[in-house]
Amino acid sequence: MPADPASAARILRPTLAEIRLSAVRGNLKKLKSMAAPARLLFVVKANAYGHGALELARLAEREGLAWGFGVSSVEEGLALRAAGIAGPVLVLGSLYPFESFVEAINAGLLVTIASLDAARQVIEAARKLGVTASCHIKLETGMGRIGARKPAVLKIYDELSSSGAVSVAGLYTHLSSADTDPDYTSAQLSIFRETAAELAARGARGLLLHTANSCAALTRPDSRLDLVRCGIAAYGLAEGFAPVMSLKSSIVFIKNVREGAYISYNKSFRADRPMKIATIPVGYGDGYIRRFSNKADVLIGGTRCRVLGNVTMDMTMADVTAVKDAAVGSEAVLLGRQGAQEVTAQELAGLAGTITYEIVTLISARVPRVYLE
Ligand SMILES: Cc1ncc(COP(=O)(O)O)c(C=O)c1O
């Protein structure tokens, strides 16, 4: 069912992303029980990696499947609040420019503090509003993105905790290579533990400590601590989890071509025999990227059909010579299952030289998300 029933009538083009809520539910339950007693921060940034942040956060909150949510920006956090999400929302990104602290505090978002400068700004914003803001401090342990090193974290903690305006609710770091480098991960974790111990020695009590993304949560029990911040496994793109998104369309045009015919821009495909070719209304404007040209398969009539020629902005051609009953209106599955066949995000990522995160996150806003129970 579409999230907004009124939107059903507006889905006229046959291209859509189906989001299986039962798969999300199953994945979150599995993560939750596996991580316990650590609690689950469901990472729904970037529109839940393309799956629809508002719907999935609502589901998780309604069914008690997550302790809270991770977003990348104040804007994403405000969108969750506007959608009725009441639970903890941690803004994982830097809150630059700093005026956004006011908005974040007003909406009760947990802000990330990754520098002394930001700590001073959040204190000022909280004082101006006359409320107590709540934050998590981000420690740099080897990701090299945002985060303060240990000595700065201690200073930040001291300033925040003595301000009376900001409560420090957590300390966290991000592991850069949990999936590829266990020793580096161990080194990151040990810097984290040392820093947490120093904060405890300074009187810090009850801080939520967290380091784990999906991969670490699944493979490194020593990384779980108080919270695990999981995204990709919830979307079914880690081993043992059920994929959530399918990208589907239908054939809108079909033709027979003779040997020697070229297909699509720049003649990158030439028919070496008479062929039957389908046109599908999906292209890089939908996030079905040009790297799939002449490489990816589309499922039509339960058969793998190769993409022919360059993927264009709005349309993609596929070889349906072997699919006798392929016709205008036949379903085309670009990501997901059809009959016994499946095109996985892993397969598409491999073809494009990227990661599954990018395959699903790139599915663009013009593709309607349809939520299936
Ligand atoms: C700070 C932070 N924590 C957690 C995650 C979730 O990672 P994953 O999707 O690998 O579970 C991300 C995602 O990139 C992140 O940036």
Image (cartoon, rainbow, N blue to C red):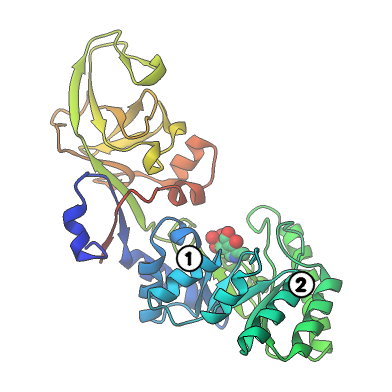
Asked if one can make out residue 106 in the rendered structure from this viewpoint, the answer is yes
The residue sitting at 75% across, 83% down in the picture is 160
Please state, as top left, top right, bottom left or bottom right, where the N terminus lies in the image: bottom left
> Mark 1: which amino acid?
Val
Decide: is 324 above or below 267.
below
Asked whether 141 or 10 is in front, the reply is 10
For label 1, the SS is loop
- Which residue is denoted by mark 2 in the rendering? 192
Quarter of image, res 117? bottom right
> Mark 2: which amino acid?
Phe
Position in image of residue 301 (x %, y %): 20, 37
Asked whether 204 or 134 is in front, the reply is 134
Asked if one can make out residue 29 in the rendered structure from this viewpoint, the answer is no
Tell which quarter ligand 1 is in: bottom right
Q: Alpha-carbon distance for marks 1 and 2?
A: 24 Å
For label 2, the SS is helix
The residue sitting at 76% across, 88% down in the picture is 163
How many numbered marks have been drawn onto this rendered protein structure?
2
Residue 122 relative to residue 267: left or right: right
**Residue found farthest to the right:** 151
Q: Does the residue labelled 2 lie within 8 Å of ligand 1?
A: no
Decide: is 348 above or below 255.
below
Asked whether 324 or 260 is in front, the reply is 260
Position in image of residue 124 (x %, y %): 70, 80
Position in image of residue 127 (x %, y %): 67, 86
- For label 1, count other residues whose C-alpha is less than 10 Å away and answer few (under 14), some (14-19) or many (20+): many
Decide: is 89 above or below 168.
above
Q: Which mark is residue 44?
A: 1
User: Marks 2 and 1: in contact by CB < 8 Å?
Assistant: no
Position in image of residue 218 (x %, y %): 56, 66
Q: Residue 90 carries which label?
A: none
